[in-house]
DNA sequence: CTGAAAGCGCTAACAG
DNA sequence: CTGTTAGCGCTTTCAG
């Protein structure tokens, strides 16, 4: 339908000016007289001129695009983090592109390469579960592109990190249970080899120890991070001769699994068994009874990560020591414990 | 840290070739001999070469970027639509940028302008609630950028549309209730002046009529689309002398409200009153009992919209008649009806 | 104050 | 088969 997109030359032609003059006028360069500027601006508007930021990026050898790689945006936590990132990016005139890895390393690597080709200003990533090497992140850095990890980090890559206080959050959750007088507190742990799995488990263990309670191996059951893992884990716990009276689940989906298994056993929550989750997924407040959980403040995570990345982009030359920022968690008391 | 990013010239210098030769070799151009290609490829790998797609875009006067504008990604439906879009885009070597309007027209318009500046290949949008004019979408089209609306469309802009079959979905939901033998089926309707409110209500009415059942005014209670509306509507229905034995809610949040009101009245679902929702929000399967609802197949909506947009991009010259595609809904039978 | 020239990295048409 | 030349739209010296 439309012919060609309008360029500085088109507006220069109309005004019988040189196109560089127009370019300067558009950027409000002091060289140009106010009258000329006004004329240029008015013609630009009339012609529906939109600066070609591709050309600008090529010239400047820099873009103003931030990239985010997350396992999936169909996830409360990541969706909220992204909102936080966009909030900061928008305010600083950066735009954001979002990529999904679908928990697949290969896809993650492909995205990294596309982002390098697109010369993004920096990238924020929460690592896919299947990722076992930091190589693609290192090639990103080799290209001089700043990198910040959030939530799911890789320890073998030296980069900025914004993490949630998994350890502290877990402690607070378990201390809440202890305060309520529960005596046999179990933990449905995640994968042992993930940082969140380990840190939350440490928090659980330390909370018990600090209160002089025994840490029994049979009270810790490892699994995954999904609902079925919660079902399986709870089933295991219920088969024990000495059942727990409270359970701290590594995250909300696992807690949901625990709920359904508990109901299967006709157990009342929290009377027969109390439950605390981690993550504050939206559905948690709709459970029956509403789940007591720990919020990770995803919006704050996003804002902190974006700010850190922007800082790195600005000091691109000097090598910014890879900072670590920890976002505090908060216990949300509802009715399951 | 890293010096400059490597270009075709760098690899040409190493090989004492002209850089255009390298460029051709990289793109597997038939001109170039296999040996040369191999050498080029190996040096490219060694030097960690990544083609600069900004330069390529500038040259080709085209990008391979699809843009999506949604009110918010923190919403099951939109998040799933985006996944569908990415699925198609990735498969066709397009990348995707996601923008959030936050239901704010101004932000929507800003995004449109940025996208024009970035010369995206096409844009997909689900319109913000506060948007009252189609102007910014028209300027997009004036720039020759193809546009496809999904779910929330604007009738005053001529563009492709992918919408959900609200009418059909409602009919199927109500027919399910009829099939189960319910005799007095009520409808918690949304706002009368919205398209989804009207269409779903029409589906309800027609389903009853077609099965020779009476449509009683007192069985239709208008309200809004939120949980409190469901509570209020259900309370109204329960106060009737002749109570319904089943309720079709305009959407899942309203159904959730109906649940809590029903429980307040000590009614058992579905024994005392059956319930069907619409939308298949994630939380619906976690309700007690799990809610029978109608899915809008967001993933399919996304795929259809992306495919339509890609079609328009390919036939950019000819003016593609603005197609309309309706995505079928599917009943998800769970335990509330 | 305005204009001219060069170049960002790449591709495409044309010569050798 | 390889090299030359030109140009995408913009910014940035440097001259006038």
Image: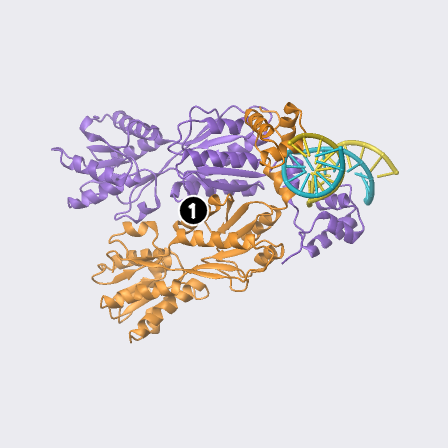
Chain colours: A orange, B purple, C yellow, D cyan
Quadrant of the image occupied by residue A245:
bottom left
- Residue at left offset 27%, top offset 39%: B254
Quadrant of the image occupied by residue A330:
bottom left
Position in image of residue C2 (x %, y %): 67, 30
On screen, residue B314 versus residue A85, left or right, reads right
Can I make out residue A13 in this image? yes
Q: Is the residue A323 above or below the residue C13 in the image?
A: below
On screen, residue A250 versus residue A307, left or right, reads left
Can I make out residue B120 in this image? no
Q: In which quadrant will I find the C terminus of chain B?
A: top left
Q: Mark 1 lies on which chain?
A: A
Taking depth in this image into account, of B46 and A218 the one nearest to the observer is B46
- Residue at left offset 29%, top offset 68%: A185
Position in image of residue B251 (x %, y %): 30, 37
Element marked by disc 1: helix
Q: Is the residue A323 above or below the residue A302 in the image?
A: below
| Residue that carries the numbered disc 1 in the rendered image | A83
Taking depth in this image into account, of B203 and A246 the one nearest to the observer is A246
Q: In which quadrant will I find the N terminus of chain B?
A: bottom right
- Residue at left offset 60%, top offset 26%: B317
* Residues packed near mark 1 inside 10 Å, few (<14), some (14 to 19) or many (20 plus): many
Position in image of residue A74 (x %, y %): 42, 47
Position in image of residue C5 (x %, y %): 76, 37
How many tags in the picture? 1
Q: Is the residue B25 above or below the residue C3 in the image?
A: below
């Amino acid at each position: 339908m439309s012919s060609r997109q309008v360029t500085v030359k088109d507006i220069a032609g109309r005004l019988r000016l040189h196109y560089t003059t127009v370019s300067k006028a558009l950027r409000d360069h002091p060289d140009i007289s106010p009258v000329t500027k006004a004329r240029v601006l008015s013609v630009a508007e009339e012609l529906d001129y939109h600066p070609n930021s591709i050309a600008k990026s090529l010239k400047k050898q820099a873009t103003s695009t931030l990239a985010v790689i997350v396992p999936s945006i169909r996830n409360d936590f990541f969706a909220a983090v992204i909102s936080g990132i966009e909030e900061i990016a928008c305010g600083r005139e950066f735009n954001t592109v979002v990529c999904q890895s679908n928990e697949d390393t290969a896809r993650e690597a492909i995205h990294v390469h596309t982002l390098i080709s697109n010369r993004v200003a920096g990238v924020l990533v929460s690592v896919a579960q299947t990722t076992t090497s930091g190589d693609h992140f290192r090639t990103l850095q080799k290209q001089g592109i700043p990198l910040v990890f959030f939530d799911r980090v890789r320890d073998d890559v030296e980069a900025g990190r914004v993490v949630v206080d998994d350890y502290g959050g877990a402690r607070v959750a378990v201390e809440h249970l202890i305060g309520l007088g529960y005596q046999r507190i179990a933990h449905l742990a995640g994968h042992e080899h993930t940082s969140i799995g380990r840190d939350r488990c440490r928090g659980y263990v330390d909370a018990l120890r600090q209160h002089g309670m025994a840490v029994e191996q049979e009270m810790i059951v490892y699994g995954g991070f999904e609902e079925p893992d919660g079902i399986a884990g709870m089933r295991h716990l219920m088969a024990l001769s000495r059942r727990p009276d409270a359970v701290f689940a590594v995250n909300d989906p696992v807690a949901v699994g625990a709920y359904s298994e508990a109901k299967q056993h006709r157990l009342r929550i929290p009377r027969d068994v109390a439950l605390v989750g981690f993550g504050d997924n939206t559905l948690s407040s709709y459970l029956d009874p509403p789940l007591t959980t720990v919020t990770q403040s995803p919006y704050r995570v996003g804002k902190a990560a974006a700010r850190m990345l922007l800082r790195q982009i600005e000091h691109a030359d000097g090598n910014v020591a890879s900072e670590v920022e920890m976002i505090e968690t908060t216990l949300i008391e509802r009715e399951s414990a």
